């Protein structure tokens, strides 16, 4: 659990894949239906928050979640985001994606994004070099 209750700005996406090995098969309808039912409780948590977007789309053969938001008081919100990414990775280990998080009132992370990468079912944190330091790269 992350102890933080300031401003949070986040943007991310996950492409869902049930298998790491492409020879094991792709995401079929029964796998997808089961997966969506299993993560529905986590997704519904985000419906209680304002100032957010969580969108599921199936485009051709791709199944994608987009998520973004801006909140004044993060409290458990970051924990919920991390839990969502980890759970999707566990239930669909072929999934991959990125989550960019900025905690603008945090004494350590105020001027940089934290990047969480989901790949092969594992969520890891990385330093951002594209948008950080936020001042001067994207702000004054």
Image: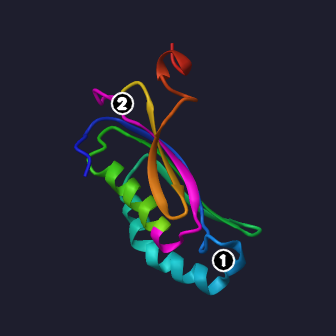
Count of number-bearing discs = 2
| 3 to 138, vertically: above or below | below
Give the class, few, some or many, for how many residues have Cα within 10 Å of label 1's Cα (few <14, many ≥20): some
Q: Magenta residues?
A: 90-108
| Pick the front one: 53 or 58 | 58
Residues at marks 2 and 1, CA–CA distance in whole angstroms: 37 Å
Q: Is residue 100 left or right of residue 77?
A: right
Horizontally, is 5 left or right of 134 in the view? left
The image position of residue 86, as x and y in percent, is 42, 62
Going by the picture, which residue comes out furthest to the right? Answer: 60
**Magenta-drawn stretch contains 96:** yes
- Colour pattern of the rendering: rainbow
Q: Quadrant of residue 103?
A: top left
Query: Do residues under tags 2 and 1 come within 8 Å of each other at their CB atoms?
Result: no
Magenta stretch: includes residue 58: no
Q: Is residue 46 visible?
A: yes
Secondary structure of residue under mark 1: loop
Q: Position of residue 31 (x, y in %)?
A: 59, 82
Mark number displayed over residue 3:
none
Q: Position of residue 70 (x, y in %)?
A: 43, 40
Residue 100 vs 110, above or below: the answer is: below
Compared across the picture, whether 51 is left or right of 77 comes to: right
Relative to 41, residue 69 above or below: above
Residue 62, image x and y in percent?
A: 70, 66
What residue is at 40 percent from the left and 67 percent from the top? Answer: 42
Residue lying furthest bottom: 30
Element carrying mark 2 = loop
Residue at the far left: name it: 3
The dot on residue 27 is: 1
- The crowd level at tag 2 (other Cα within 10 Å; few <14, some 14-19, many 20+) is some
Q: On the image, numbered disc 2 is attached to which residue?
A: 109
């Amino acid at each position: 659990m992350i102890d933080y209750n300031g401003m949070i700005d986040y943007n991310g996406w996950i492409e869902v894949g049930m298998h790491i090995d492409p020879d094991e098969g792709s995401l079929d309808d029964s796998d997808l239906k089961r997966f969506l039912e299993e993560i529905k409780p986590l997704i519904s948590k985000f419906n209680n928050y304002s100032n957010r977007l969580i969108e599921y789309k199936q485009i051709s053969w791709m199944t994608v979640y987009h998520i973004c938001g801006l909140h004044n008081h993060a409290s458990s919100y970051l924990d919920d985001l991390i839990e969502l990414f980890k759970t999707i990775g566990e239930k669909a280990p072929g999934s991959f994606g990125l989550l960019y998080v900025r905690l603008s009132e945090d004494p350590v992370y105020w001027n940089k994004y934290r990047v969480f990468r989901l790949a092969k079912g594992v969520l890891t944190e990385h330093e951002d070099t594209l948008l950080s330091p936020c001042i001067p790269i994207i702000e004054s």
